[in-house]
Amino acid sequence: MKHFLTGILFCVLALGCFAQDEYVDSLRRELAVAVEDTVKIAIYEELFDYYSKFDNNIAVCYADTILLHAFKSKSYHWMAVGFRSKGIVKEKTGNFIEALNLYEKAEQIAKKVNDYRVLYQVYNDIGNIYEEYINNDKAKRYFELAIEHAKKIEDDECLAISLVNKANIYYASEDYDTIFMLYDSALNLVSDVNTKVAVYNNLAYLQYFTGNIEDSKNTYSILLQSLDDVTDKYIYVSVLNSMSSIYIQENEYGKALNCLSEVDSICNENNYEEAKVTLFQRYKELYEKMGDYEKANYYLEEYYSLDENISNTDLTERLCKLEFRYLREKLELELNYQKALNAILFSIIAIVLTFIAVIAFLLVKKSRMNKMLAKLNADLKQRDEEISSNLDYAREIQLGCMSNRLTKSNLQMFVLDRPKVVVGGDFYISQTKGDASYVVVGDCTGHGISGGFLSVLGIKSVYEAIEKYDTLPEMASFINNEFCEIVSSAENLKGESLCLSMLRICGNEVRFLGSKQKMWLVSGDGCDCSPVSQLACKPEVREYKSSNAIMGSAVNEEFAEEIINIKSGDVVFLSSDGYPDQFGAEGKLKYSRFRALLQECSQMEPDKAKEFLSAKLDLWRGDLEQTDDVMVVGMYF
């Protein structure tokens, strides 16, 4: 009940907090018609940026929403943006440790997809936190990373901001030469007026602080020229007040008086009371240095009077507001107390009655649903058993088709046959005709039942080819034309294809022909791999590529064979693409790792090699499902 009421209270507060301004309304209208998750996330990000300026509670809700949709759409970019958004809220509320953890999560995700803009933002955020903690070494390191990534995204404004951030670190070590250099670099890049004003202000302050009065005055003059495009006169007044202080210190009273007169005029036009306080203080300093103590005392009195009036006015306004707020809230509480009490009692009665009705309805519905579920479970179990039985029988048929029709091959070999489901699209054939042995590995489009049907058609074509022809190119041409005729006879079969690896073994000669498949020969070249020299005597792996033509794509394709001489102790491997294409925690296994596994298992007995490859496949796959049918054949000479 407590969580229920808390949820209602949260919803009411959230609804009350949304500002009904035109900008937010327009975003909501866009959100209402948005369909794609990426479009919705972009709108949620704009809403986050809007509310993060004044309401952290609503902002964090939008950050969570960004993350929710990012995980749903599996977008690494928006995941990184979501974690960074949550970090911004935590940083604003003073939770620096939590902010750092969230920024680091954003960094890790952005690195996966080389999202340089997000990395630039995150590194600046982390650097600002470490600067706040006065850990300048770490702050410097992260600002340098931000500079590096600003260059990668080719954004001069971002680069300028990072340079200024890095420059501010050097104040602690009083390395002013480095600060000047970084400020100059930033000014050469920046074009935005606001950013330029910020850099010039920092530069002028540093020049004045280090005693470079003339340079400081020149910088302020440049700053005033930059302010021509700024409509905020308060910034203009602040710069003139700062320049007048420098002129007073340098005894340039005429220039100081000109600055102060202009400030006085602008303050009177715009009623800048706080700026007037600084103005009167500068007037007092000016006339005191000029020896006009009467005017100096006059402006000193004006300074104290205005400063006190501002403080008293602020205090009076605050007290009036507090008193008015107290009286209004007290009256509202008294008027609403009885209404609230009546509403609560009515709500409790309504909730209790509704709760009883809902419970009764749910109990009846639950009883009916349980009966329906029991029947559905029984039906599903029966259908599952029927499907499993049919698949097992289909597998027996497929294996029967793969059994040799002619003289059985006497090769020493192993076959790793692991379909993705019970029935697969991969197949192998091993048999002898005359004085030659033939080994074929096929990979039909798809897996499961559809792949199994295609494999039966492929097996049939291979057997016919071996019976009719003696050379591999003739066999391949026959199989290709047969498969083309099969897939072109039905509209739904267009696009189906067959990839083959074919070997003809006669004595020490191996002839290889393939279609989009490879052959590997592992040879130790007679090296005696004793226990001492085993590491230095790894067998050599040679890879033989085949034709890029796919069987079933076009008739009358030509296929070329390759002749290889083998020696005793050599091992030949054929494989479909299922093993190297298997996904694991690190991505695809790929052919480079597959070749290394073949090299390692080539020195094992066939049964051990088969167990080794199967175990390595399971280890790489982990908890992920098998990607495709797997077929690996190894032949030992």
Image (cartoon, helix red, strand yellow):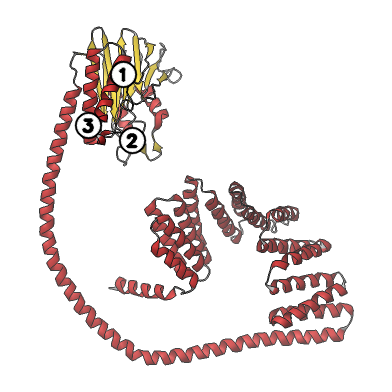
**Residue at mark 3 to residue at mark 2: CA–CA distance:** 27 Å
State the residue in front, 175 or 595.
Answer: 595
> Marks 3 and 1: which is nearer the front?
1
* Residue type marked 3: Gly
In contact (CB < 8 Å): disc 3 and disc 1: no
Which quadrant of the rendered structure holds the N terminus?
bottom left
Question: Could you tell which of marks 1 and 2 lies nearer the N-terminus?
Answer: 1
Asked whether residue 95 appears in the rendered view, the answer is no
Q: Which residue is at 46% across, 74% downward?
A: 19
Residue wearing tag 1:
477
Q: Quadrant of residue 194?
A: bottom right
> Marks 3 and 2: which is nearer the front?
3
Asked whether residue 68 appears in the rendered view, the answer is yes
**Badge number at residue 619:** 2
Q: Is residue 42 left or right of residue 451?
A: right
Q: Is residue 201 left or right of residue 489?
A: right
Q: Position of residue 326 (x, y in %)?
A: 48, 89
Residue wearing tag 3:
452
* Residue type marked 2: Leu
Disc 2 residue crowd, few under 14, some 14–19, many 20+, Cα 10 Å? few
Q: Secondary structure at mark 1?
A: helix
